Image: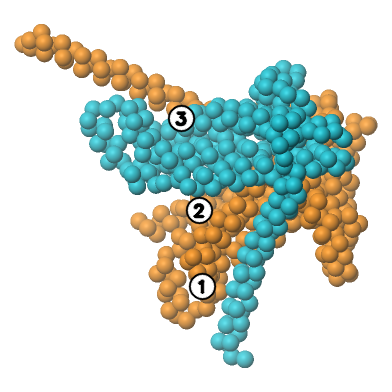
Amino acid sequence: MATPEEQLILHRQLQAKSSGVLLDRIFKGSAFSFAALVLIVLFGIMLMLFKEAWPTFAHFGFGFFASAEWDAVNNKYGAIIPIIGTLVTSLIAVVIGVPVSFGIAIFITLMAPNWMKRPVGIAIELLAAVPSIIYGMWGLFYFAPWFANSVQPIMTDTLGELPVLGQFFQGPPIGVSIFTAGVVLAIMIIPFIASVMRDMFEIVPTTLKESAYAMGSTTWEVVWKVILPYTKAGVVGGIILGLGRAMGETMAVAFVVGNSLELNTGLFYPGATIASTMANEFNEASGLHMSSLIALGLILFIITFLVLSIAKWFLMILERAHQGTST
Amino acid sequence: MTKYQVRKIVNFINLSASILVTLFGLVMLAWILSVLFGKGFQYINWAVFTQMTPPPGANGGLLNAIVGTLGLTVLAVLIGTPIGVMAGTYLAEFGMKGTFSNVVRFINDVLLSAPSIVVGVFVYTLVVEPSGHFSGWAGAIALSILVIPVVVRTTEDMLKLVPTPMREAAAALGAPRYKVTISIVYKAALSGMITGVLLATARIMGETAPLLFTALNNQFWSVDMNQPMANMPVVIYQYALSPYEDWQNLAWAAALLITISVLLMNILARYTLKSPTSR
């Protein structure tokens, strides 16, 4: 039988332990509920946007997705022009951004001398840190006029003469256009894609590269035939991630796209994207107009959700493949 | 020409192209920064920091916008950080492999890249519309939703870098789980977690789109969180697109200030980052 002193000590120990258990439960429980909050936010966004967009869907039905009419005076709204604008500007951004990012990633991982790698990498990453509204101002006041005066006429005179393709390179030389927006977006997504590609290229085992060099490959052949196949899924994932960013970008596009809701085949005409339309028209919107803008937001969210899911899926494939080879 | 020569030429062309596109990226950065400094620096003066945003044609500064941006940013970080840290803790310490954790991770990544304007509209429908007016609170909530995924991600990554034997050693001494996490794991991962918060701060400082739908703008001095609140990004947006030259000049000054702050935050984040195992 334990002495009273010993019993007291035992009792205290048990007490300490049980309060620890209780606090443990509270800690774990709150950690869990905040993790759940992340899910709730996403579903909240979906739910609230759908609820607010419902009047528009109820009023126009599927016509909302098919109509090219956006007329606030007569309260008629159709989403097709901003949707096309979003897709086309992001596509231009990816077409320009991917080769440039690829080159930058090659330069940093394979070509740059060691003292140069870090500063160049940091400089490119700073490009990602510049707020999007700054791109907008620079794009509107400096890039667009320069582009309209120096590049666009040359493109219209050469590419614009091509059969079929020529119609895409037409438009007034005012600088603000779908194409300008695409180029500015390209510059904005380059740092993201380049950094994903660089990370991917760095995980390629050195022995693999060395054996290719030992076989007499040129650096380009190592890139094209060894590194790229090895990192394919991750590179595709990174590109799609960049595409997702380009689609949701708002401020830079709102400055340089021209905000015109008319359909033109020429890429040098002013246009609009989903995000730019929302930012631009929100101030004077109410009722059905507001509901239509929120419906646009819902469409944008769903599109980027799908795009990001695909990107994640590709990145997961790469991860699995590497787990497979390492075990 | 032999096949060998062709291969060498292809190699040369493609590698030269890599150098050229890298130069292109650097030139763009230099162009943007030089425009910012060239245009913005000359309009930064004492009045910018001491006077309110003016009506067109009058003298004025950015005082209310600077204070508003600082207030909104600090508040958003204060709301978002604990939520993000706790959610990240759950992912790293409690539910490493479960389906729930995987879903949260995926959703968190979606939120990380979600268009910020959609977050703005969400808070508009959640806070602004029911209350009937734009407010600083709504702005702070919208920004905090952008803070959370960044903090969740970095917290989880940093906690995972803390070696398990450290946790086991603490647990073997009889420390309960919460104590192990707070006094041992957090301490080891602190610099990385601070990096995450700094990156999140840098991200929201220049955000404009969500504020258009929430805090909007205020021409006057106001620290009332229930009222529309002046902030630099929206001031830049409205003033830059206005036809008045003095407004545009103020927009350039604001653009320079905000970019310098964001870049400093990023550089600071880079320097605070230390591996949790290096201590």
Direction from residue A95 to residue A180 in the image, left or right: right
Which quarter of the picture shows residue A153? bottom right
Label 2 with label 3: CB-CB less than 8 Å? no
Q: Chain of mark 2?
A: A
- Which shade of the palette goes to chain B? cyan
Disc 1: which residue: A222
Tell me the residue at 10%/8% (across/down).
A4
The residue lying toward the viewer, choosing from A106 and B118, is: A106
In percent of width and height, residue B95 lies at 41, 34
Q: How far, Cα to Cα, is label 1 from label 2?
A: 22 Å
In percent of width and height, residue A270 lies at 86, 50
Tell me the residue at 64%/65% (across/down).
B23
Residue A193 can be seen, yes or no: no
In percent of width and height, residue A138 lies at 75, 51
Disc 2: which residue: A317
Disc 3: which residue: B86
Mark 3 crowdedness (10 Å alpha carbons): few <14, some 14-19, many ≥20: many
| Position of A13 relative to B11 (above/below) | above
- Which shade of the palette goes to chain A? orange
